[in-house]
Image (cartoon, rainbow, N blue to C red):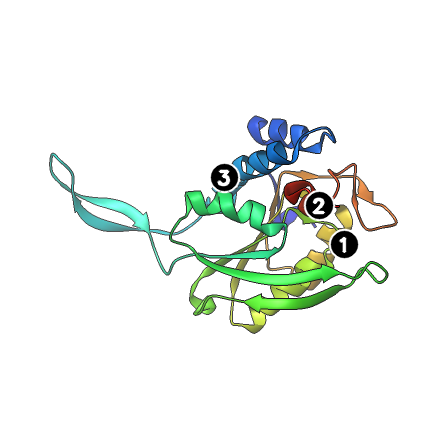
Amino acid sequence: MLDHLTIVSHPLVQHKLSIMRNKDTSTAGFRRLLREISLLLAYEVTRDLELTTTRIETPLEPMDAPTLDGKKLALISILRAGNGLLDGILELIPAARVGFVGLYRDPVTLQPVQYYCKLPDHLEERISIVVDPMLATGNSSAAAVSLLKAAGARNIRFLCLLAAPEGIARMQQAHPDVPIVTAAVDSHLNEHGYIVPGLGDAGDRMFGTK
């Protein structure tokens, strides 16, 4: 099950995540840390992007310089909490195309309910990176990836801050071809579908809502 899973163990990632877990961290602090950690996670999820060369002139001489190959990346945010990761990644990859999938989890069934979907074009020619801070039950994440595949996406990666074993298993079952990059895998889900020990509801902590 772990072949498709990458846990980013970089000390800065783990340190910032620990501060985010602390219930006393402010909304502003949580939001800032999520932006910072998203940059570090983005380095890992884009580690194997293909390169080509482009002829340029340096101040000293011409050279064939490495540049990214293919169409611009597609970043797909699962609303609303995904936007916290999206903002940071866009600082690193400002030319990326951006899409949004609106899903909320039914509190009784824990199943995803779709209310919005707007995706970039030519997904079949792009690498798509789906972002959501929490991979909990995995139901919303699996549903979002299914929407992308239905729109033509073929090269999809999933980036999250925290994952639960249940969510990883659900994604592996539904989409074994989609690699997952995360900062940590926590113990389990509680009866309400929250990651334990986790950090609470990422969207509420980012936006200061309850």
The amino acid at mark 1 is Thr
The amino acid at mark 2 is Thr
Q: CA distance from mark 2 to mark 1?
A: 22 Å
Relative depth, front residue between 113 and 187: 113
Q: Earlier in the sequence, mark 3 or mark 2?
A: 3
As drawn, the label of residue 39 is 3
**Dot 2: element:** loop
As drawn, the label of residue 30 is none
Q: Which residue lies at the image location 66% right of the left edge and 28% below the top edge?
A: 19
x then y, percent, for residue 98: 47, 58
The amino acid at mark 3 is Leu
x then y, percent, for residue 150: 58, 73
Q: Quadrant of residue 205?
A: top right
As drawn, the label of residue 137 is 1
**Dot 1: element:** loop
Give the number of the mark in front: 2 or 1.
2
Q: Quadrant of residue 91?
A: top left
Relative depth, front residue between 110 and 43: 110
Q: Is residue 125 above or below residue 182?
A: below
Q: Name the outermost residue toward the front.
A: 209
Q: Please give the residue where the numbered disc 2 appears in the rendered image.
A: 209
Q: Which residue lies at the image location 50% right of the left edge and 39% below the top edge?
A: 39
